[in-house]
Image (cartoon, rainbow, N blue to C red):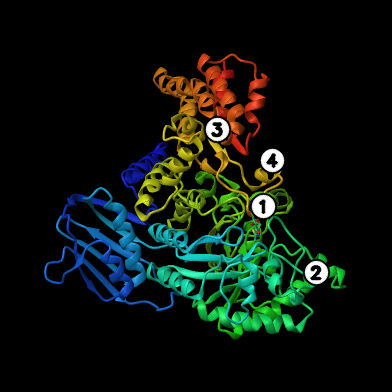
Amino acid sequence: MKNFPALLVLTALAAHAQWNLMPLPAVIEAKKGTFNATKLSFQITGGDMRVQRAVDEYGQRDATAPNFTIQVLQPGAAVQQLGEDESYTLDVDPGIIRLKAPTSLGALRGLATFAQLRVKGAVPAVHIEDRPRFPWRGLHLDVARHFMPVDVIKRNLDAMAAVKLNVFHWHLSDDQGFRVESKVYPKLHEMGSDGLYYTQVQIKDVVEYARLRGIRVVPEFDIPGHAASWLAGYPELAAAPGPYQIIRTWGIFDPTLDPSNPKVYEFLDGFIGEMTKLFPDAYFHIGGDEVNGKQWKAKGLTNTEAVHAGFNQKLQKIVAKYGKRMEGWDEILSDSLPRNIVIQSWRGQKSLFEAARNGFSGILSAGYYLDHMDTAATMYLVDPLDEKGRASGMLRSTEAKTPPSPPLTEEQRKRILGGEVCMWVEYVSPETVDSRIWPRTAAIAERFWSPEGTKDIADMNRRLDWTSTYLDRFGLKHNTNYQMMLERLAGSNNVAALKNLADVVTPGDLGLRHRMKRDYTQQTPLDRFVDTARPDSPVIRQFNALVEQYFDGGKSPKVRAQIDQWLKLWAANDAILQQMAENRPALAEIKPLSKTFSALAAAALKGGGMRADDALFQTAKQPVAEVRLSVAPALTRLATTP
Ligand code: TNX
């Protein structure tokens, strides 16, 4: 009996090891046989044009001899609502596939599952019953720091739909750019965007593109701070005299709207009235983060927290007047606001739980910051409903000090609606954005969709690598741009040595990049080695796993042979790379890194016995050219362990 739990775990592992699905469904049971038809003919009962459009990507609609039936009970809301039923059941049998869903949305989710199952042509017979764990599963994308053209947005919406994310949070204004055409206040986009903005026609097109894929679009206009781009055209809205310009660097800045000026609210009324017509979603995000209060204090508004709360109260009334619910970052949380707003927590589960206790709804983003460059596995284990979960980044130390609070009641738990992955783009361009978002976001999508207990890291990583390739078919560029950028750096398509190095490093997070290179601006090209390298490289993961297996599993010679294969390749790499770097100024900055890498691999190859305080290991720990050598700990272990 004692072995029972372990056995159970093993069967659970075996049960899903065969599936290439991400996110994993709630219930999946293999059946005998395979569905083999290469041509699909669909028969759809019920549902709306969203289902028809999705089906048209796979085959024909043919009522006479269908081999794929879709039965939808209700079309679902024309403007997608939070909490709509997204469940479905999918039955694949040798002769026929049957998909059933209460709403069109559920049918879309079922088709997304089907598409992943079918990736090799045939579809294994299977019974799936599936539903999301959280109703709010989002991706937040900043398009202010670096503008992201419509084609970038659309391919990312396709990828979102493929992994069942259902909210696109569009961060449309910040100090560095105002990205929407306004007909009411045209100086917003004319003077705040360098001409890089979406026309209203483009906005409507994107909103419809998302809607057809079962994705809500929540716009964010970040005020009263992060608002310098508004003030370029309308300096009279500021709390201190202008003139103002678009800010070209990164950080927290002074320019802020004036909460004591009635004209500011008139302006916001006109603006929000215009924008709420463009964005049909029930929620409207007003930002509210990182107000430093300097301009307010200078004019005697000294209690900045109360001033901010007062501003938000007035703002909320305007948002509500246009039929919307207000959403904002952590800092807007205040007892004075109605409970129908949504708090987006970027500081940790603690503030989210606090909000829920106070009657507010909320979503978690702390821990899902793609620009922190954490691995998928690290972010995967962050759970919106785990109060003691890892708090991300800057607030970790303060959070650790506060005493624990009582667990949430069932009612309070329901207020935690889900989460959003955050893509801030200070150090990201249209060329690199896919590789920062994907495939890591697919793992977080699984956290938001799949049952709470879905936590097998090894299996997640296996499916993540599969998903990375799967996403290529939607035109995502995280793989193709890697190769292209390597070739551009190398000045040749012979990139093997450069790729070997890029495969074992992790690009620095935003803090590291800021510390190592102080002169970044919005115009700095993001085409260097650090931009080319990708977070959570599969090679690092696989090598680390191999080394762990070696030491934990009694130093098997078979595993050692596999390790040594890598080490030989890497030890010889520097000679080739140094030659490649001759006359390539773009590669000069990585010469020392390459040298350290090969020296470390050579030391590891010799095997054991080196002193841990050897200078080589200290050097290998230091970031170079804004990247970290992520195989350094494993190589050091091999070189020093007797
Ligand atoms: C904090 S999180 C910000 C953003 C930055 C981001 C970088 C939040 C609401 N504000 O302005 O881009 O950190 O990680």
Residue type at tag 1:
Thr
In this view, the mark in front (4 or 3): 3
* CA distance for labels 4 and 2: 33 Å
Residue 508 horizontal/vertical position (percent) = 61, 42
* CA distance for labels 2 and 3: 52 Å
In this view, the mark in front (1 or 4): 1
Q: Residues within 10 Å of mark 2 (few under 14, many from 20)?
A: some
Give 149 or 107, whichever is nearer the viewer.
149
**Which of the two labelled residues, at mark 4 and mark 2, occupies the earlier sequence position?**
2
* Mark 2 sits near ligand 1, with its Cβ under 8 Å away: no
- List the residue tagged with mark 2: 304
Residue 164 horizontal/vertical position (percent) = 41, 60
Q: Residues within 10 Å of mark 1 (few under 14, many from 20)?
A: some
Q: Residue lying at the far front in this picture: please name it.
A: 583
- List the residue tagged with mark 1: 521
Residue 359 horizontal/vertical position (percent) = 62, 72
Q: Residue lying at the far left in this picture: please name it.
A: 64
Residue 95 horizontal/vertical position (percent) = 14, 58
- List the residue tagged with mark 3: 584
Q: Is residue 321 above or below residue 51?
A: below
Taking the image as shown, residue 512 lies to the left or right of residue 243, namely: left
- Residue 535 visible (yes or no): no
Question: Residue at left 66%, top 43%?
Answer: 512
* CA distance for labels 3 and 1: 24 Å
- List the residue tagged with mark 4: 516
Is there a contact, CB below 8 Å, between mark 2 and mark 1? no
Taking the image as shown, residue 196 lies to the left or right of residue 209, namely: right
